[in-house]
Image (spheres, grey):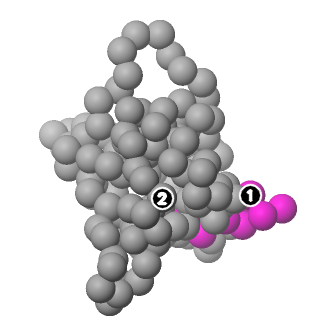
Amino acid sequence: MINNDILRRLSKIFDFNDEKIQAVFALNQCDITSEQLTCMFKEKDDAAYQELSDVEFASFLNGLIVEKRGKQDGPDRQAEVELSNNIIFNKIKIALALKADDVIAVLELAGLVLGKYELSAYFRNVNNKHYKRCTDDVLSSFLSGLKIKFSD
């Protein structure tokens, strides 16, 4: 999935305005200007469109964890240079303190049925033989389920 699209969907799910989004970025030492944010929210075919890099989006997701769960002792978490759907899925799950049953329930809201074993494969180390790559469809279903869950 495209980082900009996920950011747009997360901002709608949590009802974040531009200032709140910038504050979440700042929680992980990433400064995004209002102009940059406006360009990130433009459509891809717009000349002013600015792509959200993996490092920037990882900073946002790390900031979201701090926003939702509080700051932990120790140094700030370093933003990943490269993101995968699995990492994005896991960071959102951590930010919302969701357990496996919670994630399964959210996915079911969007019409996707997964078992615990199937789900755990997405959160395993990439070198684990049971690791499974998270597809755009699974991540999109998770975001759709979150939208339903938080719109109540």
> Dot 2 corresponds to which residue?
34
> Dot 1 corresponds to which residue?
150
Q: Residue furthest left?
A: 127
What is the x, y in percent for residue 84? 27, 54
What is the x, y in percent for residue 125? 25, 37
**151 over 81 or under it: above or below:** below
**84 over 110 or under it: above or below:** above
Magenta segment's dominant SS is helix
* Figure quadrant of the N terminus: bottom left
What type is the residue that disc 1 sits on? Phe
Kind of element beneath mark 2: helix
The residue depicted at 32 percent of the width and 49 percent of the height is 56
Q: Residue furthest top?
A: 73
What is the x, y in percent for residue 57? 36, 51
Whether residue 122 is visible to the viewer of this picture, yes or no, is no
Q: Write the start and end of the magenta stretch as one range.
A: 143-152
**Neighbour tally class for label 1: few under 14, some 14-19, many 20 plus, Cα within 10 Å:** few
**Neighbour tally class for label 2: few under 14, some 14-19, many 20 plus, Cα within 10 Å:** few
Kind of element beneath mark 1: helix
Whether residue 102 is visible to the viewer of this picture, yes or no, is yes
| Marks 1/2: CA–CA distance | 26 Å
What is the x, y in percent for residue 32? 40, 50
The residue depicted at 35 percent of the width and 87 percent of the height is 46
The disc placed on residue 65 is none
The residue depicted at 42 percent of the width and 53 percent of the height is 33
Which quadrant of the structure image shows residue 96? top right
Which quadrant of the structure image shows residue 136? bottom left
The residue depicted at 55 percent of the width and 51 percent of the height is 21
